[in-house]
Image: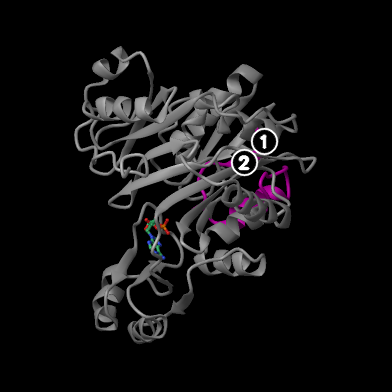
Amino acid sequence: MTIGVLGAGQLGRMLALAGYPLAKSFVFYDMSGSPSAGLGEVIVDREGKYLDDFLARVDRVTYEFEHLPVEVAERIAQHKPVYPAPRALQVCQNREAEKTLFGELGIPTPEWRIADSAESLQAAAEALGCPVVAKSNTEGYDGKGQAVLKSPAEAAEAWKAIGHSRLMVEKFVTFSREISIIAVRAIDGNVVFYPMAENVHHEGILRYSIAPAPGISGDLEAQAHRYIKSLLNELDYVGVLTLELFVTADGLVANEMAPRVHNSGHWTIEGAKTSQFENHVRAVSGHPLGATDARGLSCMINIIAEHGDTDRILELPYTHLHLYGKGERPGRKLGHVNVLADSYDELKWRVRNCASFLPGSPEFSCSLTKG
Ligand code: AMP
């Protein structure tokens, strides 16, 4: 079976690496002009001229990137099975559609308004009460296209800085930590959940994911399962879905979802019985899903901007290094390290030791280090 993948970055690379042992082949379709998957067959098509060539080579299609025109996915779906269906892409590309769906399914979100001018941004900030977070309604990722307004008077400046014609304006949520839940739905509707991850961001970019997230109550986990399962069923979803959540005093509040394998699930490569990548390949291929239990405790450390001392990291007996074959550049995800341990104390010092070989890594500060 040949799986066509829309997008050709490191997530696609890791999907292929997980799919090869199951004798799958991969063809990537890249509209960005800068593919980095580095394996499989890659069709670079900035102007959408080679879609038929792509379709002729693949049996079914999935995504590793959600910021491509929905019309492309819809056109593909007329010829080949597309998992998840294009509606998932449409919802995840548009914060307004996403938050509306969350609301319809009873999934709590920050209070929000839409702004389409500097004046309406100011009015939204006044109505919601500052601080608020203004985000471009489409095309935002890794904290790009966002601004925090401490007062409505900052609206004109924020509007200009973001530079989009439609903004999602959210009340700033006071949270104790950020977590994510990853679930997989098979073609027959079977759903499995991974243990949740606690995520630490720095300057809008994920830096550490600890899994299973320490100290998550059964109630909170059940809440997260309910929310993501309602999304999977509503979207008749096939594959991996990720839901990012804030933990607040009043329970979980949804931030956003991603219709694909996710950076906060990279720990599953060595840290779970079946990785998120293999389970996505299994789901879109129509195979039974694999066990999602954790193998001990994990922390994923992202390698950002500089590779650091990779040989020293390779010498550590509790690490697994994954490099994406990309050149160094500020803010760029170049790879990740999965650190494994048998206790959270052990995990803490192992992560700090490993991070000392990665220049620019922020301090490892999470629920484990805050006592
Ligand atoms: P996003 O691109 O929506 O995932 O936002 C990037 C990061 O900004 C999140 O991971 C949070 O750390 C922070 N953030 C986003 N929205 C809010 C909010 N409404 N309240 C507080 N922090 C937020």
Residue 105 drawn at (x, y percent) = 67, 65
Left or right of residue 311: residue 70? right
In this rendering, the label closer to the viewer, 2 or 1: 2
- Amino acid on which disc 2 is placed: Thr
Q: Position of residue 76 (x, y in %)?
A: 66, 48
Q: Residue furthest front?
A: 371
Residue 298 appears at what percent x and percent y? 44, 29
Amino acid type of disc 1?
Ala
Q: Is residue 55 left or right of residue 94?
A: right
User: Quick check: can you spot residue 143?
Assistant: yes
Up-down relation of residue 16 to residue 209 (above or below): above
Ligand 1 placement by image quarter: bottom left
Mark 2 and ligand 1: say if the CB distance to the nearest ligand atom is below 8 Å. Answer: no
Mark sitting earlier along the chain (2/1) = 1
**From where the camera sits, is residue 59 visible?**
no
Instruction: Name the residue beneath numbered marker 1.
Output: 56
Query: Where residue 186 is drawn, which disc sits there?
Result: none
- Asked if residue 270 is among those painted magenta in the image, a careful observer would answer no
Q: Is residue 278 above or below residue 23?
A: below
Q: How is the image coloured?
A: one colour
Label 2, on which residue?
Answer: 62
Look at the image and say whether residue 61 sits in the magenta stretch: yes
How many other residues sit within 10 Å of disc 1, few (<14), some (14-19) or many (≥20)?
few
Please report the bounds of the magenta region as a residue range.
58-85
Residue 88 horizontal/vertical position (percent): 63, 55
Instruction: Please identify the quarter of the rendering in which residue 274 is found.
Output: top right
* Residue 148: quarter of image: bottom left
